[in-house]
Each structure stands twice: as structure tokens, then as C-alpha cells.
Amino acid sequence: MVFKANPYSLSDDEMVRINSARDVFLRFRSANETPLWIPAWSSAALEHVLDELLAPAGSQIADVFWGLWAALGQSSAPLSAPMANFLLDVVKYCFGRYRARYESEDFHWLALSMQQGCTEAQAYLAACALPPALIQSCREAIMNALKSSEFCEKVRPMLDSDAQQ
């Protein structure tokens, strides 16, 4: 999914940063010959890329997550154990290293996108990345997207209201 249309009234600069992030994430591929996007990464390489995406003036945490959301929207990005670990690594690094920026980010676009439908990998990203204030409004959409996935039961405790406090 390349963001050609602009349903969220993003600026041209934001669109460029988002599409750039999407392209960067898609380069984290395993070397096998499968057409599926199975991520392969080292922590150092991922951290370097995330730091580069967030270094330019005007960059936002949303650039990373919009780009990742777009990459995951491709049918060739199934939710697998490597993908789940990759998504969790992105979320943990952004939250840990850029906590103030992460906590001030408006993730309403992600909640809205969830309500419009998503892939299993996108649902897992939302379960990991959404702040507590938004997670409950997306709980049903996340669980529905993951209902036939091995990750459904792994995500359920993350969505419990008690776990969000």
C-alpha cells in the first residue's frame, strides 16, 4: 500500500517521510526466495534505521508507524513469529528511546484505520503500539482480525483493561 491518496490530510512532507519509512521497513527481508515479507534484522540495524527516520527536523513517531502500517497492508506481509518479534522490537525501541515523542503522538489515525479493516499483522501492531486510552476502542477489531491466528490468545491479555493501567 503506497499512500497515493491522502485521506488524512497529511502534508506533502509527511507523505514523503511515511513512504520513505515504508520502503525502509520492506528492506528488512529474509534472504530466502519467498515473495512473502518475512522480516530479518539485527537490533543494531533496526535501531540505526529508526534513529535515521526520526532524526530529521519535523519527523514524528507517526512517520514510523504510518510507514509500518503501509508496509503491513501488503498481502505479502503475514503475521508470523518473526513478524511479531519485529513489530514488538519497533514499538519497544520507539517507546523506550523516544518516550516523550511517543507519549505525545496522536494515534487516533491508527484507531480509525483499525476500524476500517486491517491485516493480522496490522492488528498485532495496533495491539502493541496503541496507548491505553485508545486500545479499548479497538479491542474488538483487533480480536476479530486475529481470530484465526495463533496470536489471538497471546494478544488477549495485552487488551485487558486491567493490563492497560
Image (spheres, helix red, strand yellow):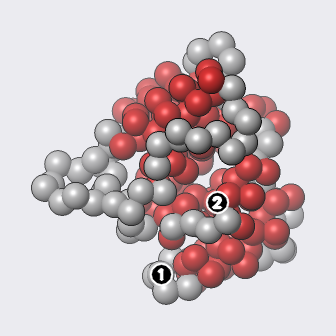
Is 138 displayed left or right of 21 in the figure? right
Q: Which residue corresponds to the image point at 39% horizontal and 63% vertical from the top-left?
A: 75
Residues at marks 1 and 2, CA–CA distance in whole angstroms:
15 Å
The type of residue carrying mark 1 is Ser
Q: Where is residue 20 in the image (x, y as percent from the top left)?
A: 47, 30
Q: Residue most toward the left?
A: 33
Q: Residue most toward the top?
A: 57
Q: Residue most toward the bottom?
A: 148
The type of residue carrying mark 2 is Ala
Q: Is residue 36 above or below residue 152?
A: above
Residue on which disc 2 sits: 126
Q: Quadrant of the C terminus?
A: bottom right
Q: Residue most toward the front?
A: 5
Residue 111 visible in the current orientation: yes
Q: Position of residue 148 (x, y in %)?
A: 49, 86
N-term mark: 1 or 2: 2
Q: Which residue corresponds to the image point at 65% horizontal and 73% vertical from the top-left?
A: 142
Q: Specify the label residue 149 is tagged with.
A: 1
Q: Where is residue 88 in the image (x, y as percent from the top left)?
A: 53, 54
For disc 1, the neighbor class at 10 Å (few under 14, some 14 to 19, many from 20) is some
Q: What element carries label 1?
A: loop
